[in-house]
Amino acid sequence: MARPRRVPWASKSDLVDMYELLFSPESDAPTRARGMARMSIYISSPSCPAFLPLLHSLISAAETPEPRTAEERHRMRLVCAMAIVRFVNGLVDPLQTGPYARPIAHLAISLRLPPSLISLRHRATHEDLPPLDTLLGAVKQAIQYLHDSSFVPLISQDPSSTTAQMARGGGGDRPADKLIKRWKRVNKSRLREKEVGSENASGREIQSIKRDLERIDKAELVEALVSQGGLVPLAESKRPSQDGMAPSDASLQIWSPLLSSLVELHPDFIDTLSHRILDGVSPISEPLEPKTTETRDRDGSYRWGLATWLLHLWTKDDEAALSLEAKRDLWKTLLGCLVTNDPHLRRLYSQLLVLDSTLKPIALGELLRFTGAGDDMQLDGEENLKGLEEVDQPRPRVLENGNLEAKLAEMDDRLRRVKSLREQVDDRRIRSVVDDDSVASSSDPPGWRRLSRLEWSSRPIGQRITA
């Protein structure tokens, strides 16, 4: 028998009412405001679940009125950035239980946090503030994460309730899903019948779908496209093979016109879609339950199907092309995901290096930052990045059987490679330093001298020099 616990709501129906006020398809701004007011009361209680304050700050940021001036726009960027930083820190900080702090990206793997949110949190904390549209998309993604991982399990303890079924997605397809399915069905029929123009019945239905798309939120459209049956077909036989590097011609003919139309509605739609695609390719987004070989292969084909769309969008040069800033953010996020040693991510990494040679200096800089070498050293990128793209080489059979000694040997080999890179950086730094700073200057006070670059190390206040 489960032990009783204290909760801030009087009954389960109060919690269900708040959920419907916030997440019901019929809820509007005044309805959500009432739900936020009720959530504020729950937050004031010491027994409030930890995710509710995070959800409150995220929804408050998402419900902020549209900014009209540059000052309001900057203020809204700060609000959204702080909500995302508090969201990531609030989930990850309880996992910092050891004597030494672990990287947030590593802890996020256990929580299945989308990598794009981790990258955006780092950017909002240490770099320039991201654009407002990017921040708003991340806020909605964080709300969806808390909805699926925290709120739904809390209210779904009664499987027979209508609200629980709606929370689990049993209440039918969302409007965005229905429109995407209509678009796919109509365009497949047009391709099969070789119909063109907009004067026939299928052309008029296409125009009707485009008008309906204007009323759908961008985040919902992105989720509908990334889900199975959207950009990636449900049938495995219609998906790109593991050797394929682009979506099928039929998929391009079906979805390219839709993407162009969505770019006209939302200029940054391709950037948002690409970040969500990379989240789908990452194994961090997979569920925690163990999988059979058949399920793993099916999910692998779906993930690689998403990866081929990212490769396709990366090389486009029309109005539906990725911005340079989005490419840089996606590349840094991908480099951070390589810690999982996932074959699909490594193959995607390899193909992007082939498609875009400007990515190698960024990859090298991130590698040097990871090893603590700094950004002032220039090494041979071809030599130091060697091995990361070797994803199609056959692995020893012992690794598949879980041989511990072979795995440890592979880890030792990787450690030696990182140490070799660090020693190479240190050697080049030492050779580049001219030790002429240690000569005492006439302006130095008695008993003090200026340290050379090799002698200097950071200390509180100063460093004592023995005579």
Image (cartoon, helix red, strand yellow):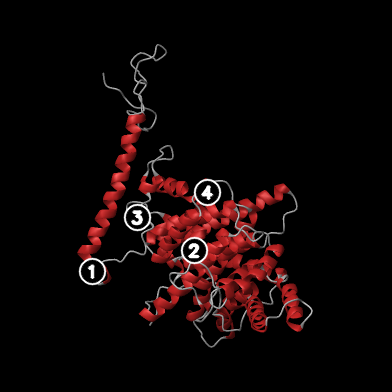
* Residue at image point 37% right, 52% down: 101
Residue labelled with disc 1: 398
Residue type, mark 3 in image: Gly
Q: Which mark is residue 125?
A: 4
Disc 1 to disc 4: CB gap under 8 Å: no
Residue 193, image x, y percentages:
67, 84
Marks 1 and 3 close (CB-CB < 8 Å): no
SS for tag 2? loop
Q: Residues within 10 Å of mark 1 (few under 14, many from 20)?
A: few
* Quarter of the picture holding the N terminus: bottom left
Mark before the other along the chain sequence, 2 or 4: 2
> Does residue 207 lie above or below 351 as drawn?
below
Q: Given contact means CB atoms under 8 Å apart, are the residues at marks 1 and 2 in contact?
A: no
Image point (69%, 77%), residue name:
26
167 relative to 300 in the view: left or right: right
Secondary structure state at the residue bearing disc 4: helix
Q: Is residue 10 or residue 95 the one in the foreground?
A: 95
Label 1 sits on what residue type? Val
Q: Amino acid at mark 4?
A: Thr
- Label 1: state its secondary structure: helix
In the figure, 53 relative to 422: above or below? below
Give percent across and percent down for residue 352: 48, 57
Q: Position of residue 94 (x, y in %)?
A: 41, 60
Label 3's element? loop
Task: Please give the label number shown on residue 114.
Answer: 2
